[in-house]
Amino acid sequence: MTIQLLAALALVVLVLGAFFPVLARWGGFLIALDSLLALVFELGHGPLISLMWLIIGVALWLFGHWIEAYRTGYWRSWLAGQTFRLPGLRALRPAME
């Protein structure tokens, strides 16, 4: 697969994640896991590409959790709730009731 095809796939997951947050959460998790494995075992296209995919995977995972929290009013995981308490992400938190 080429990098352009993978980037297009990540964009599709992001767009579909707005409608299906579970897809964004699991897709982001799998992308992040794959990139971490590529970094550890030195697989793939190199460390910079793997780091780019790690950032994309974490962003998708956070986006899926944010959409779910916005819709339901609670976080699907403890880690996502704690992540959105960080100073940079605190302003993005949806209003919880």
Image (cartoon, rainbow, N blue to C red):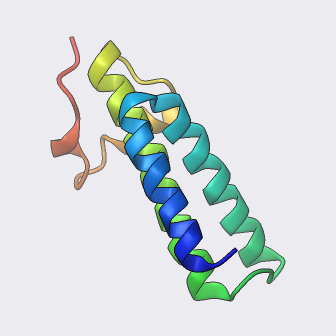
Instruction: Residue at the far top: name it.
Output: 97
Image location (x, y in percent) of residue 73: 30, 15
In the image, what residue occupies the spot 55% across and 49% down? 28
Q: Is residue 19 above or below residue 59?
A: above
In the image, what residue occupies the spot 72% across and 62% down? 34
On-image quarter of the C terminus: top left
In the image, what residue occupies the spot 77% across and 67% down? 37
From this viewpoint, is residue 24 visible? yes
The count of marks equals 0
Q: Quadrant of residue 45?
A: bottom right
Towards the viewer: 88 or 22: 22
Towards the viewer: 82 or 38: 38
Image location (x, y in percent) of residue 53: 56, 69
Image location (x, y in percent) of residue 15: 38, 45
Q: Quadrant of residue 91?
A: top left
Q: Is residue 28 left or right of residue 36?
A: left
Q: Is residue 6 left or right of residue 65?
A: right
Q: Is residue 19 above or below residue 48?
A: above
Q: Is residue 38 above or below residue 91?
A: below
On-image quarter of the N terminus: bottom right
Q: Quadrant of residue 85?
A: top left
In the image, what residue occupies the spot 58% across and 78% down? 3
From this viewpoint, is residue 82 visible? no
Image location (x, y in percent) of residue 12: 46, 51
Q: Is residue 53 above or below residue 67?
A: below
Q: Is residue 9 left or right of residue 42?
A: left
